[in-house]
Image (cartoon, rainbow, N blue to C red):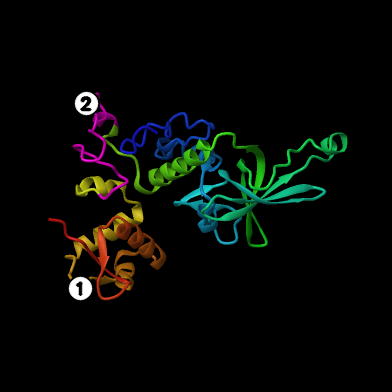
Amino acid sequence: MSAFGGYTTTGYGGGGGDDGGGFTWGSQGGSSSQPLARAVNDESLRPVTIKQIIDAEPAYAGDANFRIDGLEVRQVTVVGMVRSINPQTTNITYKIDDGTGSIEVKQWLDADKTADAPDAAPVFQEEEYVRVWGRLKSFSNKRHIGAHVIKPVRDFNEVNYHLLEATYVHLFFTRGGLPNAAAGGGAGGGGAGVGGDGGGDSMFVDDGHDARYRSYSAKARKMYDYLQRNGNPTEGIHMQVIARDSGMSIQDVMAGAEELLSHGTIYTTMDDETFAILDRD
């Protein structure tokens, strides 16, 4: 992860990271391969923070699957400290804390293996850092991770690396990759970085309207287009009017508004539900 400006240096969108869990962003575009691409992406391993798991939205009403950054997520990896250990006959439940939140991780035991070798499943000590690979699950409205593998963290740099990797993937899916990143990262440097010509660093607000617009989600673009088409009055337009005239649901309007507000593209006027585009000179 040599430069935040390029977003492409860690291998996402190609072969993936060190754990082989990379995303193939381009595979979602073709209509002929959409079912296959969706199946692959649904099972992709995603680095996340525990707060992202806690804040994840159900993919569908009453469904056990979840969405993070608008994408369905099933397989996750987290890094955190073991706060408590609760061994039982069929599983070991760990309470993992990564500084953003805490979650239970259940490691199910193989009855045949434990009968022959009671210590076959590794039992970690409290206050020890571990990396967990597993499936995001929910039982009785309580979320947990069903662990496939749990390994101790031998180098504390892995903790920092995981947080950076989770941040990178979050930014990739919420703000998009830079279209000119490959062309800007020449030997002279600075082309795709902060202050470089063209794309700029998409971790920051970009003054170029085209670059910002391409990074928006469909909901944010639709809301932005509506405000622009209607003259962007200084008093703003209420979300109920936006929803009615644009054909969007209230939830979609609020999601688009939240994204545009985070980019500094729009602002609230008379109240928290009335919006106008922030003019940039």
**Residue 75: x, y in percent?**
58, 43
- Amino acid under disc 1: Glu
Q: Which mark is residue 150?
A: none
Label 1 close to label 2 by CB (< 8 Å): no
At x 30% / y 75%, what residue is drawn? 271
Q: Which mark is residue 235?
A: 1
On-image quarter of the C terminus: bottom left
| Camera-side residue of 138 and 202 | 202
**Residue 159: x, y in percent?**
52, 41
| Camera-side residue of 229 and 171 | 171
**Residue 16: x, y in percent?**
47, 32
At x 25% / y 26%, what residue is drawn? 186
**Residue 66: x, y in percent?**
54, 53
* Separation of marks 1 and 2 at Cα, in angstroms: 46 Å
Please give the range of residues in magenta.
182-205
Please rate how many residues cluster around mark 1, counting C-alpha atoms within 10 Å: few if below 14, some from 14 to 19, many from 20.
few
Our reading of the magenta stretch's main secondary structure is loop
Q: Is residue 184 magenta?
A: yes
Residue 219, above or below 241: above
Helix, strand or loop for disc 1: loop
Residue 184, above or below 260: above
- Amino acid under disc 2: Gly
Q: Is residue 248 left or right of residue 141?
A: left
For label 2, the residue is 188
**Residue at the right extreme?**
115
At x 45% / y 40%, what residue is drawn? 165
| Camera-side residue of 29 and 234 | 234
Q: Nearer the viewer, mark 1 or mark 2?
A: 2
On-image quarter of the N terminus: top left
- Label located before the other in sequence (1 or 2): 2
Please rate how many residues cluster around mark 2, counting C-alpha atoms within 10 Å: few if below 14, some from 14 to 19, many from 20.
few
Residue 26, above or below 232: above
